[in-house]
Image (spheres, helix red, strand yellow):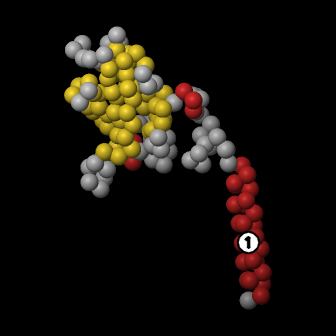
Amino acid sequence: MKVFLILFFIAMLGLGSYAVNDDVIRNPDHSDGSTDASDENNSEDLIENKVFKIASPLPDQTVNEEFVFKGKARVFEANFQYELKDGETVLENDFITASEGAPGWGEFERVITVPDTIDSKLILKIFVSSAKDGSEINVLEIPLKTE
């Protein structure tokens, strides 16, 4: 029994030192604790919340007939929704499937066509439909301009 207790104690000491070392190795630039070194974009060039990192379009960017919507998403089963709105009028709505589902960051890219009959300001609304009640969660709105 003494041998078992000694081995157990040694094992616990080893695990405790591993946890301390793990904290030291963690990359301080990632607030979510991830160490995804494949981020091509500087965080200053992104608009983001806890589940989306949008590289394009950026807020108040001027868009023409079409624009590229791309970034990363960390969402259940890699699916999320978007709406292109002109004021309160929804011009387009659809879902996108990223390359990977949560807990990973999946990449996505979609070309969105802008209708001719619009105001000079658009809103690209990105969100996840709650599995609990279908409500919109993790909403991110990006204001856009047109010429």
Residue beneath the point at 37% across and 40% down: 139
The quarter of the picture where the C terminus appears is top left
Asked which secondary structure carries label 1, the reply is helix
Q: Residue at x 67, y 44 (%)?
A: 27
Pointer 1 residue: 11
The amino acid marked with disc number 1 is: Ala
Q: Closest to the observer: 82 or 19?
A: 82
Which residue lies at the image location 72% right of the left edge and 77% below the top edge? 8
Q: Quadrant of the N terminus?
A: bottom right
Numbered circles on residues, count: 1
Instruction: Please state if 36 lies on the left or on the right of 47 as rendered.
Output: right
State the image coordinates of residue 34 (x, y, percent, origin top left).
59, 46
Instruction: Spot the residue most to the top.
Output: 147
Q: Is residue 15 above or below residue 117?
A: below
- From this view, report whether residue 118 is shown above or below residue 7: above
Graded by Cα atoms within 10 Å as few (under 14), some (14 to 19) or many (20 or more), the crowding at tag 1 reads: few
x, y percent for residue 130: 31, 50
On the question of residue 106 being in view, the answer is no
**52 relative to 92 in the view: left or right:** right
Q: Residue at x 29, y 31 (%)?
A: 83
Q: To which quarter of the image does residue 86 belong?
A: top left
Rendered image quadrant of residue 42: top right
Describe residue 140's horizontal placement relative to residue 12 as left or right.
left
Q: Is residue 120 visible?
A: yes
- Residue lying farthest to the bottom in this orientation: 1
- Residue 109 x %, y %: 41, 27
Q: In the shown orientation, is residue 47 left or right of residue 38?
A: left
Residue closer to the observer: 144 or 131:
144
